[in-house]
Amino acid sequence: MDLKRGVSTISSSELLPGSGSQQSTDRVGHRSLVLVVFIGGVTSAEIAALRFLSAQEGMGYDFLVATTKVITGNTLLRPIIASSKEGMI
């Protein structure tokens, strides 16, 4: 079997304790809350990826996102454009 970089044959339910079939049955319907902190900013795509993971069947976690800034295309490019106008690039 060939494995490519970044590809795992282990499912997330095997990696994350409390998810999937190993989820605690004493509190049916309870999902653990995971705080994800982004220092320096987060993009909407990264938030969407966490929402996608949370919506997967068998995922025993809800994600709460905390960040110092939400990065958009404009906020990413604005400093680059400003420095190029000043002749720094």
Image (tube, rainbow, N blue to C red):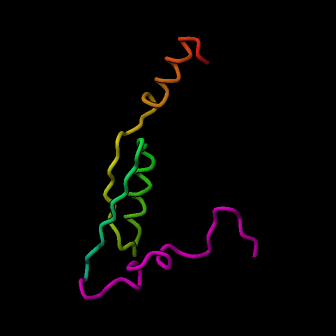
| Residue 53, quarter of the rendered image | bottom left
Report the number of discs.
Answer: 0
Q: Say which quadrant the C terminus sits in.
A: top right
Q: Is residue 77 above or below residue 68?
A: above
Q: Is residue 84 above or below residue 35?
A: above
- Report the residue that reaches farthest toward the top: 86
Q: Is residue 35 above or below residue 17?
A: above
Is residue 44 in the magenta section?
no
| Residue positioned 25% across, 83% down in the render | 28
Q: Position of residue 21 (x, y in %)?
A: 41, 85
| Residue 69, quarter of the rendered image | top left
| Residue positioned 42% across, 34% down in the render | 72
Q: Does residue 11 appear to the left or right of 45 in the view shown?
A: right
Instruction: Write the start and end of the magenta stretch as one range.
Output: 1-27
Q: Position of residue 38 (x, y in %)?
A: 40, 49
- Report the residue that reaches farthest toward the bottom: 26
Q: Say which quadrant the N terminus sits in.
A: bottom right
Is residue 7 in the magenta section?
yes
